[in-house]
Amino acid sequence: WMAFHQNGAAFSLFARDYTDKIVGKFTYLLFDIIGLHAILFILLGGGTVLLSDKAKTKGIGALFALAGVIMIIIKLDTLGAQNEIVPEQFQSFNPMFIVLLTPIIVGWFAFLNKRGKEPSSPAKIGLGMVITAIAYLIMVVASQGLTAVHTLGGESSAITVSPYWLISTYFIITLAELHLSPMGLSFVSKVAPPKMKGLMMGGWFGATAVGNYLSGFVGRFYQNWELWQFFLLLVITSLFAALLVRIFLKKLKHATR
């Protein structure tokens, strides 16, 4: 959770100080509530058309996709060639990707389960930490050539990067979160003795609280280190967590039987 909850700290500061504030009309659609819903309509509607076997369901999906296309066309007509975004708008990507990716992840694991290849809950958690490391590796690359925060003097950086660096990081870290959060709750409910299940669930949320605290604690390094060093630290800690899961994987899998 220390790594996951940087979206309210380091990511927001990176969006404020190091990310382009002026974007084209197509990019702005991702930051506009109407454009965002239109994209979701197209993706979810299109996915329904492709995956559903029922004609009625396909028709409903097609209507949603068509509505999304119409909304985008209308919205594009109202936008200029250059449009301003604010850092707070990046906060919408995590919940949007949760809505978009949840049915995909659930469907993927159901597909694997039918073939007897679904990984265990601990394995999913370990995979989630590896994916988290990949997300922060993107930020390591994005930070190359950018000056440290403490040298800015409270101003935004003269050198900025495309918002797609942060958007792609949000996408991958949300994918990782969906491998960890629900799987962790499921794992605790499986292994906890019936009389202690409530206590163990409380312990899980207590660990989440500790992770939130550590998120702020580690965040102080964002102000003092080079940016790439800070994000590399999160890569290393995420891989270390994945390694711990791998070391104890057999014991954790045995506990769920």
Image (spheres, rainbow, N blue to C red):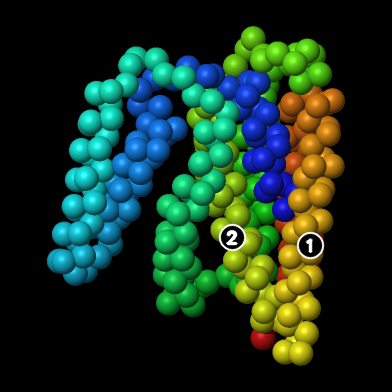
Q: Residue at x 69, y 17 (%)?
A: 146
List x then y, in percent, for residue 179. 59, 60
Residue 68 as seen in the image, left or right of residue 104: left
Q: Earlier in the sequence, mark 1 or mark 2?
A: 2
Q: Residue furthest top?
A: 158
Q: Residue furthest bottom?
A: 195
Distance between mark 1 and mark 2 Cα atoms: 17 Å
Disc 2, SS:
helix
Q: Is residue 48 above or below residue 160?
A: below
Residue 122 as seen in the image, left or right of residue 170: right
Amino acid at circle 2: His
Q: Residue at x 42, y 70 (%)?
A: 111
Return the residue at label 1: 207
Return the residue at label 2: 179
Q: Is residue 94 visible?
A: yes
Amino acid at circle 1: Ala
